[in-house]
Amino acid sequence: MSFSAPGSPPPNTPDLPPSAVPPMPPVPPQAQPYPQHAYPAQPAYPGQPAYPHPYPYPAPPPPGIMLRSPHGLATALTVLLSIAGVAALLLTGIRVYLWSLMDGLVKDPLKVKDIALARVDNVTAVADGLQGMLWLATVIVFVMWFHRVRQNGQVFRPDAFTLAPGWAIGAWFVPLANLVMPFTIARQTWTASTQLAPDGSFRKVSSAPVTAWWLAFAGSQLTDSVFSVLYSAADTPEQLRGAAVVGAVSGLLTVAAAVLAVLFVRKLTALQSAKAAHGPYAAA
């Protein structure tokens, strides 16, 4: 009796001539679960090493991650951000009105009626409550969209990221780090979603929408925190007047952040749609 190496044809025997040995069945080609585009070795992003080997596009992502359209969430987010921007503009007007009342109270207390003071307090409370509920809905949808485009970026270009996909959600809830980490994820997702040049070289698309949105958003959050502290601690008309100025600035920054967020969301969604539909290379 003799043994053959695994995968080798059976040995010839006197009872079974070579011509009678059945051929080995052909090896089926490897299944391709994703649509493929020719994708050469990747050029390095600035400050990162090149991807070491050619790989098909989209690259097989980790289990459970696949391309998913962000269009529906982007549309809902556009509507919510637009409404939130209008609400922030109205709240800014209320804070300007508060400033005018406090300024009048400081200059001539007899000219400001008690009913006007009561009215501005009631309107401010109602406006703050409505904006809080609207902003909560906007934040939930935004984080869902942000996580989805981050996962798509993982499929497009897994070597573009320094943080795991889960940080697209968790980064927003880490004190102080939430002023930096979401911006880093947004910039890396933007880069991963950008098509290469026709010759396969790195093609930079201006990330100004990302930077402008983040500066306005971070500024609105910081000034709103300062306004909340000043408004809660204010005991005199002078202090309320100063708080109202900070609140008005915060409101204007919130309006700007909402507008710039719409531009950022729509542009990044368009970049991912183009890359998913047409492959890794931009048209000449």
Image (tube, grey):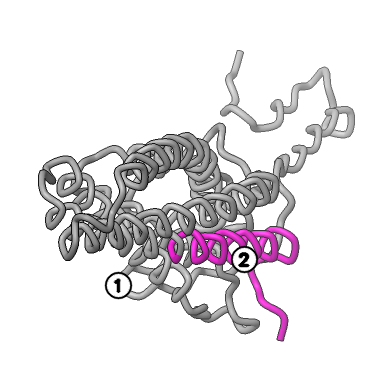
Start and end of the magenta stretch? 256-284
Residue in the image at 80% along x and 38% along y: 26
Work out how far the residue at label 2 is from the one at label 1, CA to CA, in angstroms: 22 Å
Residue in the image at 52% along x and 64% along y: 259
Q: State the SS at label 1.
A: loop
**In screen coordinates, is 253 left or right of 136?**
left
Q: Quadrant of residue 180?
A: bottom left
Q: Quadrant of the N terminus?
A: top right
**Residue holding disc 1:** 47
Front residue of 94 and 275: 94
Residue in the image at 33% along x and 61% along y: 248
Residue at the extreme right = 20
Front residue of 46 and 222: 222
**Few, some or many residues within 10 Å of mark 1 (<14, 14–19, 20+):** few
Q: State the SS at label 2.
A: helix
Q: Quadrant of residue 121?
A: top left
Q: Is residue 180 visible?
A: no
The prevailing secondary structure element of the residues shown in magenta is helix
Horizontal and vertical percent position of residue 271: 62, 66
Horizontal and vertical percent position of residue 168: 41, 44
Residue in the image at 71% along x and 56% along y: 36
Amino acid type, label 1: Gly
Residue at the extreme front = 110
Q: Earlier in the sequence, mark 2 or mark 1?
A: 1
**Few, some or many residues within 10 Å of mark 2 (<14, 14–19, 20+):** some
Q: Quadrant of the C terminus?
A: bottom right
